[in-house]
Image (cartoon, helix red, strand yellow):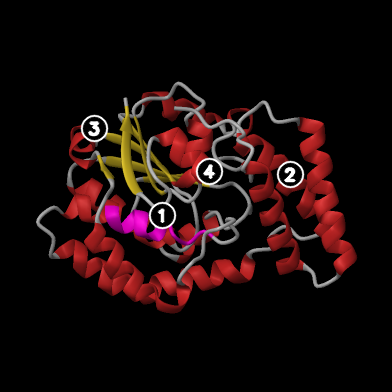
Amino acid sequence: MCMQVFPECVPCLTSRVLYEAKLSSTDFATQLKAEEAAVKTMCRMGFEGPIALLSTDVHRAVYRILGDDDPYRHVKRLANETAVKLLPTVQSLIQTSSDPFRSAVIAAIIGNTFDFGVLGFEVATDDFEKEVATIYRHGLDIDDTDAMKPLLNDVVYVADNVGEIVYDGLLIEQMRKLGARVTLVVRGGSILTDATMEDVWEFGLDKVADGVMTTGSNAIGIKLDEIPAELRDILPRASLIIAKGMANYEMLSEYSFKPVAYLMRVKCAPVAESVGARVGDFIAKLVR
């Protein structure tokens, strides 16, 4: 599996640029300059490499034009508030389950629906309780959770978005109950709606995981030339890497680190084709 640039990625990326530009500024000229910066960056970089590398450079260029290092700050707060509101419900589903680990995986993937600005994908914050119940009953479309259990020794857990990180903590708790040592990894700076150390501290996840570190930058996913030495050291030694969300899939699928469990909701056709699923699927896919 690997995730290169598909033709559909270009309009999706420009759509997200416009979305974040509107979040940051009501000035049409500024919004147009942001879109211009995105297009120029795409033309300069070309479309040969992984989509996450292209996206990283595009969003960095747009943030510079906007003069805003976190255009998503308000929707990130909404995502966290919505996730916390439903936390007791999600905890109950896990605690009463015959397989708490699998239920915690489903809960973590339910949280992966907090992804604002993806073309053709809407976040149901207005009735998320109903969404949680529906998704939980549906379960996983690709379910490798049983195959993951024997690998739960030294786990590196690469988080994705805010909101869902609240439920990532529930999965980390279950893995530790099964004897795993878990290192949580979040972004080293603000990009899109990705979780950072501020979210770790807000929800006390530094007390839930055995260790916490960052990716070293605001790159989308794991960008090897920007990660700190400590993360570079533990990735190849992990008994299992858990990668949350499409962005982490887009980057980690390019590397040789194995085994990796990809936990996500599939939100676009290119990722669906790459991972062997359908748009809308909930997957826990183990790649050895």
**From mark 4 to mark 1, how far is it between C-alphas?**
23 Å
Residue at image position (24%, 67%) is 91
**From mark 3 to mark 4, how far is it between C-alphas?**
23 Å
Image marks 3 and 4: residues in contact by CB distance under 8 Å: no
Q: Which residue is mark 3?
A: 151
Q: Residues within 10 Å of mark 4 (few under 14, many from 20)?
A: many
**From mark 1 to mark 2, how far is it between C-alphas?**
31 Å
Q: Quadrant of the C terminus?
A: top left
Mark in front: 2 vs 3: 2
Mark toward the start of the polypeptide (3 vs 4): 3
Q: Callout 3, which amino acid?
A: Leu
Q: Callout 4, which amino acid?
A: Ala
Q: Which residue is mark 1?
A: 206
Left or right side of 157 for 187: right
Mark in front: 1 vs 2: 2
Where does the magenta region start and end? Answer: 106-115
Q: Residues within 10 Å of mark 3 (few under 14, many from 20)?
A: some
